[in-house]
Amino acid sequence: MTATEVAHVGAIGDSKDRWEAIPCHPLGVKPSGNALVATSNLRDAVGTLNALPDELILMCLEFLDAASLLRLGRTCKALYAFTRSEDLWKTFLVGESRQKLVWRGTWRATFLNLSPSQIPTIDCSALFSDALHRPFYCAHIALEPYVTGIPSHNRIPRLEDLSAEEFQEKWTDRPFILTGPVKEWPVYRQWSTDKLLDNYSSTVFRAEAVDWPLNTYVDYMKNNADESPLYLFDRSFVSKMDLKVGQPSVIPDAAYWPPPCFGEDLFAVLKSDRPDSRWLIVGPERSGSTFHKDPNATSAWNAVIRGSKYWIMFPSSSPPPGVYVSVDQSEVTSPLSIAEWLLGFHAEARRTPGCIEGVCGEGEVLHVPSGWWHLVVNLEPSIAITQNFVPRAHLSAALDFLQNKADQVSGFRKNVHDPYSKFVEKMRQSHSELLEAALEELQKQKEGRKRKWNEIVHAPPDNGDPSGKTGEFSFGFGGDDSDIEVP
Ligand SMILES: O=C(O)CCC(=O)C(=O)O
Ligand SMILES: [Fe+2]
């Protein structure tokens, strides 16, 4: 059996009806199961290390510097394969600030500044390791089976446009895709990765933990085989690119403007003290965002300027399958990569009530309501702009978050010491009625939780009634995000 065939077998458990063509691992490494029928095994040469599972060997290697990794890799083929693990070299590169970096197709080649001809082809086809093969496999799974065949009841509604009144009345709690407004933007008509290079080639943008000039990032985009590609996510793009932003009736030379249907953004009252609110997002196919809720209970819109994105979303109260959340929602545990989640949980997610999915294409904009879980994967190289905002329907959610999840509040400058008080103060000055109504709503919610808590604590003990009823209380908190708090 070839490595390619074995990789196919790995996809059976996934119950997809299409075989996925996974190329051969660059060193020929095969999944672990192949060891059962192998006549020889390169791992036998690693000596005492043979007692350790592959994952532990990789963890030990994290303690070595580059020179030691290179020396160890020369001792035998198996350790050469282990020391080629891309995560090790990515850590080195992310940790250093090299002035001039030339992307060379892999993190290792880039760190060592090696051209392809300087990288030997070493046959490791008698090495059987899921830990080494899996990231490669995940980097090559076909996305198509996951993003097509969306059941009709799961589909994100698509609308040409909405009025601000319609949004406020019916849509603030529902994801939707707008097909109209973004197509008017100058950046929609003008931007492509090549066009951006013409103007911003040496402009430095943030991509996760690194700051790279755009030309380096575009080289990376065009030539990488990462399971979770580095994602350009820059919150300062407007000033870096010297863009004007605002409704064209006010700013005639604006590069883009928020689709008017989303209406007001109440965080705007904070002026320069508002938390980060807009990002330029650029990434290759397969890059994207693993499941999360947006910061500070904000809503968001995400406009695709080039490419397309698959979105899968769940309402606030139902964490997606495979995502485990601590009681206060401060800790989220899920498989590390988007591909691992798709392989392991997508089928179940699609069957789960509340799941909603869709593809947001070029020139379209998607609405993420406050509190919704979402995972996003780029189906092609993409450029997008996203903006987070607080519509009046979610003012109480934002206030509640700032007040009661202060440890999870993010995106404020360091000089804003008490975002909740600051927001309340500014809202009181400009939108006092809205503020009072939202605070009242929060108070009612709090009293409701207190009542339920008392019902639980004071419910009479099981009275032997065969119906199992122990009192009036029934376990169903209804509504949205109902974290039970001990009053
Ligand atoms: O385009 C994407 O990857 C989604 C971005 C996103 O969810 C966010 O900015 O919060
Ligand atoms: Fe998000």
Image: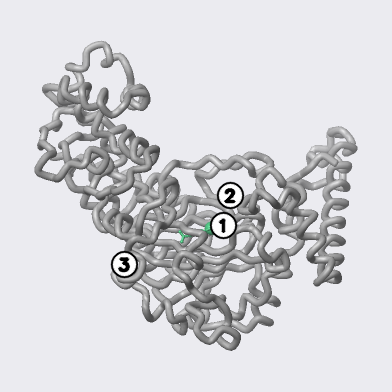
Out of 191 and 99, give the one closest to the viewer: 99
Residue drawn at the location 11% of the way across and 40% of the way down: 118
Measured as percent of width and height from the top left, residue 157 is found at: 53, 73
Q: Are marks 2 and 1 in contact (CB under 8 Å)?
A: yes
**Number of numbered discs overlaid on the protein picture:** 3
Pick the quarter of the image with the C terminus: top right
Q: Which residue is depicted at the point 53% across and 54% down?
A: 352
Q: Label 1, label 3: how many angstroms apart (C-alpha)?
A: 37 Å
Marks 1 and 3, the one that precedes in the sequence: 3
Q: Is residue 455 visible?
A: yes
**Amino acid, disc 1:** Phe
Contact between labelled residues 3 and 2, with CB atoms less than 8 Å apart: no
Say what amino acid the circle numbered 3 marks: Leu
- Which sits earlier in the primary sequence, circle 2 or circle 3? 3
Dot 3 alpha-carbon crowd within 10 angstroms: few under 14, some 14 to 19, many 20 or more: some
- For residue 76, side relative to residue 404 (left or right): left
Q: Position of residue 98 (x, y in %)?
A: 33, 43
Q: Residue at x 34, y 40 (%)?
A: 93
Identify the residue under disc 1.
314
Looking at the image, is 38 positioned above or below residue 263?
Answer: above
Relative to 211, 34 lies left or right: left
The secondary element bearing badge 2 is classed as loop
Indicate the position of residue 254 as horizontal and vertical percent values: 51, 80
User: Please, what secondary structure does the residue beneath circle 3 have?
Assistant: helix
The label number, if any, that marks residue 197 in the structure image = 3
How far is disc 2 from disc 3 in space, using C-alphas? 39 Å
Mark 2: amino acid: Pro
Residue 287 placed where, x, y %? 38, 55
Q: Which residue is mark 2?
A: 319
Which is more toward the observer, 471 or 33? 33
